[in-house]
Image: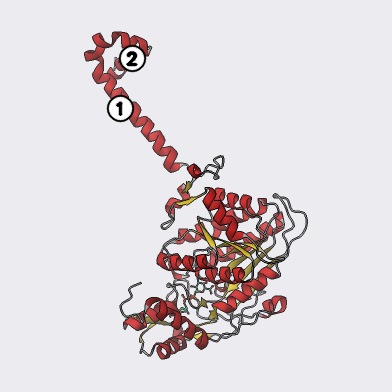
């Protein structure tokens, strides 16, 4: 008989019996029992490990109430583990709820109540402030990930706090959190700007694009479609959906089925997903194709931003050119013009027609270009920066890499003009002047900054 079965045979049938015989069996039983206890311990430890680390939604149980301090939550899920630095988030409790409600309070007649996702982001910050200033209730949501220096996001957060805007720290993939927010607040609109941005970074971390721009978007739409009343949603698509399209200027009617980057593909997928939720659930959805947005509080991963930093530091900057020295150009659009476009889209968004997951009638579905209608070669952008910074750039002319960049963008904006009077006012020279002024006030004249 194998020794293991002997061990099993020797286990007392009741604790009482064991206790009674304790003294006489002790020396004989102890090694076996110790081993068995160890195995049992390891087994349960394993179970606990599996429960806590493999369960899709571990500590965000919807049954626990967030109204007491003891119910402060920490959210993370298995899918989060694949994300770049998705921190756990804490939310809940009476003080948290008070801040949420105060931030979302409408302060003007017929004002909106807007959930702004990605509120600590570049465009999110600008749009949030503009909405708050005109009296709308604004609640921010942001996961503060470290795609770029999170201290810049914290500084934007501090700016928003001074304007009376609270940013909930959490992820759009956290359905329990989203549900809670919609239970606490009746949002009339969602301005969805949370995304994994950047064209070239998609080669390094493709999964983060799927997590944010597809899974996160679907999660948000699921919450919106279940809400009663359903909010109207305005969200950030991208000029990059035009991909390898050669017909210029880009019109919303042009083909968008040739994306040149995974980023573009996820934004295009977002447009198709928006169509589905509009069709099935009656959600009012407006996608905005932003064209290379720049300005104060911008994104450090964008060329105009890191060119400024590196010119000031005397570092070389790679300036891309197309085949046969072809010009690479962008329809750079100043952030204040984009904000006006966002507000115009919100103001003309019709109500969703569904409620509680049921469609009651056809709902609005729109896509707009928001560009500047005036493409500028990247080499001219560098020239403007040189003049503003009074430093000569160390240009390294480099062949446009095959990592998602397209050679040229140019927006036709007549649809946005017709629908809500969109009219960009800022040329690149004027906008970069404002950016440089902000940059120098934020980082100093730069040579020592190492962000
Ligand atoms: O409209 C959009 O939807 C997108 O706009 C932005 O993408 P892009 O237009 O590619 O901006 P950005 O990287 O600043 O490159 C600007 C120019 O500099 C050139 N470029 C870039 C890097 C470099 O090292 N050298 C260079 O010449 C480069 O070839 C390009 O011509 C957002 O990042 C993106 O998130 C998305 O919102």
The colour scheme applied to this rendered structure is: secondary structure
Q: In which quarter of the image is the C terminus?
A: bottom left
279 left or right of 429?
Answer: right
Residue at the (40%, 89%) spot, across then down: 386
| Residue matched to label 2 | 11
Between residues 416 and 111, which one lies in front from this camera angle? Answer: 111
Q: In this view, does 64 lie above or below 95?
A: above
**Distance between the alpha carbons at the discs numbered 1 and 2:** 15 Å
Percent x, y of residue 272: 63, 62
318 left or right of 415?
Answer: left
265 left or right of 324?
Answer: right
Res 117 quadrant in image: bottom right
Density class for disc 2 (Cα within 10 Å; few <14, some 14-19, many ≥20) is some
Residue at the (33%, 16%) spot, across then down: 8
SS for callout 1: helix
SS for callout 2: loop
Residue 268 appears in the picture as rendered? yes
- Farthest residue in the left direction? 27
Percent x, y of residue 441: 41, 79
172 left or right of 200?
Answer: right
> First in sequence: mark 1 or mark 2?
2
| Residue matched to label 1 | 38
Between residues 179 and 401, which one lies in front from this camera angle? Answer: 179
Q: Do the residues labelled 1 and 2 touch (CB within 8 Å)?
A: no
């Amino acid at each position: 008989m194998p020794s293991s079965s002997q061990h099993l045979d020797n286990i007392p049938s009741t604790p009482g019996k064991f206790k009674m015989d304790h003294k006489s069996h002790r020396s004989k039983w102890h090694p076996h029992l110790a081993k068995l206890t160890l195995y049992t311990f390891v087994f349960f430890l394993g179970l606990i490990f599996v429960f806590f680390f493999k369960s899709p939604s571990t500590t965000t149980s919807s049954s626990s109430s967030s109204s007491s301090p003891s119910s402060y939550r920490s959210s993370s899920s298995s899918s989060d583990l694949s994300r770049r630095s998705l921190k756990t988030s804490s939310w809940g409790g009476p003080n948290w709820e008070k801040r949420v409600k105060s931030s979302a309070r409408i302060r003007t007649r017929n004002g909106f109540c807007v959930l702004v996702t990605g509120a600590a982001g570049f465009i999110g910050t600008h749009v949030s402030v503009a909405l708050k200033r005109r009296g709308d209730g604004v609640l921010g949501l942001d996961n503060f990930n470290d795609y770029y220096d999170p201290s810049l996001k914290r500084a934007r957060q501090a700016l928003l706090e001074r304007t009376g805007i609270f940013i909930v720290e959490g992820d759009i993939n956290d359905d329990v959190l989203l549900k809670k927010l919609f239970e606490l607040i009746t949002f009339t609109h969602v301005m969805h700007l949370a995304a994994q941005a950047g064209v070239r970074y998609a080669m390094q971390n493709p999964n983060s694009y799927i997590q944010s721009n597809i899974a996160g978007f679907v999660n948000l739409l699921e919450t919106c479609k279940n809400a009663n009343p359903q909010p109207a949603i305005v969200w950030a698509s991208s000029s990059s959906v035009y991909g390898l399209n050669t017909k210029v200027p880009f019109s919303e009617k042009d083909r968008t089925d040739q994306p040149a980057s995974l980023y573009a593909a996820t934004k295009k997928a977002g447009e198709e997903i928006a169509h589905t939720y509009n069709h099935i659930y009656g959600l009012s959805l407006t996608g905005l194709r932003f064209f290379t947005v720049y300005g104060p509080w911008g994104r450090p991963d964008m060329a105009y931003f890191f060119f400024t930093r590196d010119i000031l530091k005397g570092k070389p900057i790679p300036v891309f050119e197309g085949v046969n020295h072809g010009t690479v150009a962008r329809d750079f659009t100043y952030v204040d013009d984009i904000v006006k476009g966002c507000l115009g889209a919100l103001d003309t968004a019709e109500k969703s027609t569904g409620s509680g997951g049921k469609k009651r009638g056809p709902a609005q579905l729109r896509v707009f270009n928001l560009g500047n209608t005036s493409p500028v070669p990247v080499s001219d952008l560098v020239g403007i920066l040189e003049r503003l910074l009074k430093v000569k750039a160390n240009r390294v002319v480099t062949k446009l890499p095959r990592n998602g960049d397209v050679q040229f963008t140019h927006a036709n904006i007549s649809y946005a003009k017709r629908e809500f009077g969109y009219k960009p006012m800022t040329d690149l020279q004027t906008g970069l002047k404002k950016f440089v002024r902000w940059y120098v006030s934020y980082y100093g004249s730069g040579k020592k900054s190492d962000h």
